[in-house]
Image (spheres, rainbow, N blue to C red):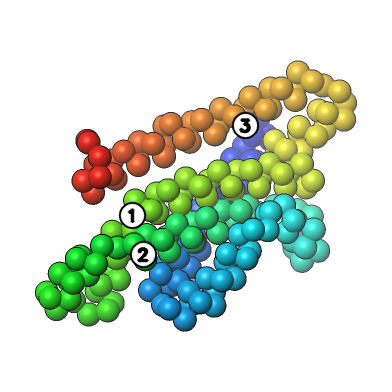
Amino acid sequence: MVALTESIQRIFIGFALAIIIGSILGILIGVSKIADETLGTLVIALQSVPSIVWLPLAMVMLGGGAASILFVVVLGGTWPMTMNMRMGMKNVQPILLRAARTMGYNRSELVWKVMIPASIPSAITGARLAWAFAWRALMAAELIGRGGLGRTLMDARDFFNMELVIAIMIIISVIGLIMEYLVFRKIEKRVLAKWGLSKA
C-alpha cells in the first residue's frame, strides 16, 4: 500500500507538471515560426529519446531519490503533450481566424480566445498520451530507482515472489484502465460533444 501511494503521488505530480510545461511549449511553438523551427526541432529530437535513458543523468544531477524519478516522469509526458498542443494550434480552421480578425481581434486575442480553445480536442489527446508515457516512464524509473511499485516489483522478483509480481502487474494495468475509461474517455466525450465533433 505504501508503494502504491508513492507511485500515485509521483505520477500525478509528474503528469501535472508535464501538462503545464507541454502546453506552454506547444502554444509557443504553435504561434511562433521561429520557435517552431528551433525549439520545435529540439522537441522532436528529444521525443525520440526513451525517457528512461535520462535516469542516469538525473541521478547524477539530482541524486538517486524521488527527484530523479520525477524528472524522468515529467520528461516522459512533456513531449507528447507539446507536440499535440502544437498540432492543435497549427490546425485551427482558417475561417475561425479570418472571422476573429474581421471582428477586430489582435494577435494576443487570437491566441487566447480562438486558437487555444480550438486546440482543446488535440490537448485532450496529448494529455492521454502524456499520461501513458509518464506512467511507463515511472514504472521503468522505479525499477532502477527507489520506492514505488516498480521497486517493489524488482524486490519481489529477486525473492522469487511470483504472486506479488503478478499482483503488481495487475495493479499497474488496472490503474491504466481506470485512467483511460473513467477519466480520459469521459473527458474526451464531453469535449468532442461540446465542440460539435461527436454526438453528446
**Identity of the amino acid at label 2?**
Met
**Residue 167 sits in quarter:** top right
Evaluate if marks 1 and 2 touch, with contact meaning CB atoms under 8 Å apart: no
How far from the left and from the top, in percent, is residue 195? 23, 49
Near-viewer residue (109 or 90): 90
Circle 3 Cα neighbour tier, 10 Å, few/some/many (<14 / 14–19 / ≥20): some
Residue linked to disc 3: 172
Circle 1 Cα neighbour tier, 10 Å, few/some/many (<14 / 14–19 / ≥20): some
In front: label 3 or label 2: 2
Q: Secondary structure at mark 2?
A: helix
The residue most toward the left is: 103
Residue at 22% x, 35% y is 200
How far from the left and from the top, in percent, is residue 191? 29, 45
**Identity of the amino acid at label 1?**
Ile
Question: Mark 3 to mark 2: distance in Å?
Answer: 33 Å
Question: Mark 1 to mark 2: distance in Å?
Answer: 9 Å
